[in-house]
Amino acid sequence: MERDAPGLPSIFIDGFTQLLVGLFLFIALLKGQARLSLLFLLILILVNGAKIWCHYSLRATRGTMSMDKMRLFPGEKLTLTAQVENLKALPVWMKVKIPLARPFGQAALEESSGVLWYQQITWQWDLEAPCRGYHQVGPLMLGAGDLLGFFHRWQNGSAACHLVVYPRLIPIEHFPAPLRELLGTRGAQGPVADPTSLMGTRDYQHSRPARYIHWKASARHDRLQEKICEPTVQMKVMLLLDVEGFTDDPDGFEEMLEVVASLAVRLDQERHPLGFAANGALAGDGCGVLPIGRDSIPAILEALARLERKPKGSLRDCLARCGPLPWGTTVIYFAHRLDHRRMPKTPIAAIVKEPGEGPLQSLVFSLDDIRGGSHP
């Protein structure tokens, strides 16, 4: 959608002034003043020619915007690129404007330059990822006008981009000993395979039962393939985050998300299957309920980046949408304050911002215990 915008301030582009110039031109012609007539005629031609020039300035122009990274951690660098192309024989004065979200610290990025016929020009900005969240960049606003700058018009260019900033990761070196003991036996030590948890496929060994044959993979590889399953004692972890209570505590909410993200990354590095559920609203598209599985850390970090301090249903309902938890699942419950009415029926461990009433139980840890002295 195109719209006119004010250009350089000048009395000659005012409608009333042009009417007076036209009147003076008529009087000069009646009086036979050739020089004055030529001056007034040039003013009218200049102003109206610039107006016509501006009217066609946005025709056959194209503007695009892109970012080299769409998902980052706070403080990481990204490059924003805006490209404008003039696909006509008329040279124009081009401007670009890209609105930024408030956490970036500035309202918008702006640049301008003259663009000749069939010329392409590119602008780049180096930005730093702000705080955790789902931040909008753009949309690209494309402006063009006459080379004298009297008139200017704007139109929408490419659509807005969205930057996903994950929670900051903090080292968790001194994790409480009782919770470490809950991690159970490493999966490589389990003698029995779990047929419901598939790790991959390999060539079929004829000594193995036929029920382990993966028929789809066999058809794809044109030879028999068998399933490779995780051991039954492989520890699986379900991370539950209760958003209620953090509505009036934004700093505590961000600190808790840092712990959840850091713990999830640590467990993923130890090859534990992870799941995640939160009862908060998510900015943009996304799901706050992720079933237990391998290689789920990107989806968990994405959900944590988009998560807002707005409760959306109960945590029990979110957990029910995951279906029955696999046998041997360790549940870690994160909340602002310990409240047994909102906790899942059988939590294995809980990490809370505030302890609640009574002393902390053996499997309930405060947020400061988890963060330890690693947090500045």
Image (spheres, rainbow, N blue to C red):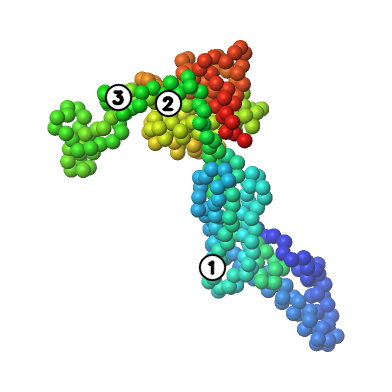
Residue at horizontal 54 percent and vertical 45 percent from the top: 163
Front-lying residue, 332 or 64: 332
Q: Nearer the viewer, residue 5 or 95?
A: 95
Q: Name the residue that disc number 2 marks.
A: 237
Q: Is residue 107 above or below residue 275?
A: below
- Residue at position x 78%, y 70% from top? 12
Is residue 313 in view from this perspective? no
Image quadrant where residue 36 sits: bottom right
Query: According to the image, label 1 marks what residue?
Result: 120
Left or right for 295, reference 98? left
Amino acid type shown at disc 3: Gly
Name the residue at 63% across, 67% down: 113
Which residue: 74% across, 66% down? 8
Mark 2, other Cα within 10 Å: few <14 / some 14–19 / many ≥20:
many
- Neighbours of disc 1 within 10 Å: few (<14), some (14-19), many (20+): some
Give the residue pinned by disc 3.
Answer: 190
Callout 2 amino acid: Val
Residue 367 falls in which quadrant of the image? top right
Above or below, 229 relative to 71:
above
Instruction: Work out which quarter of the rendered image holds the N terminus and state it.
Output: bottom right
Q: Nearer the viewer, mark 2 or mark 3?
A: 3
Q: Can residue 175 be seen?
A: yes
In the rendered view of the protein, which quadrant contains the C terminus?
top right
Disc 2 on helix, strand or loop? strand
Q: Earlier in the sequence, mark 1 or mark 2?
A: 1
When asked about the image quadrant of residue 187, the answer is top left
Q: Nearer the viewer, residue 18 or 134?
A: 134
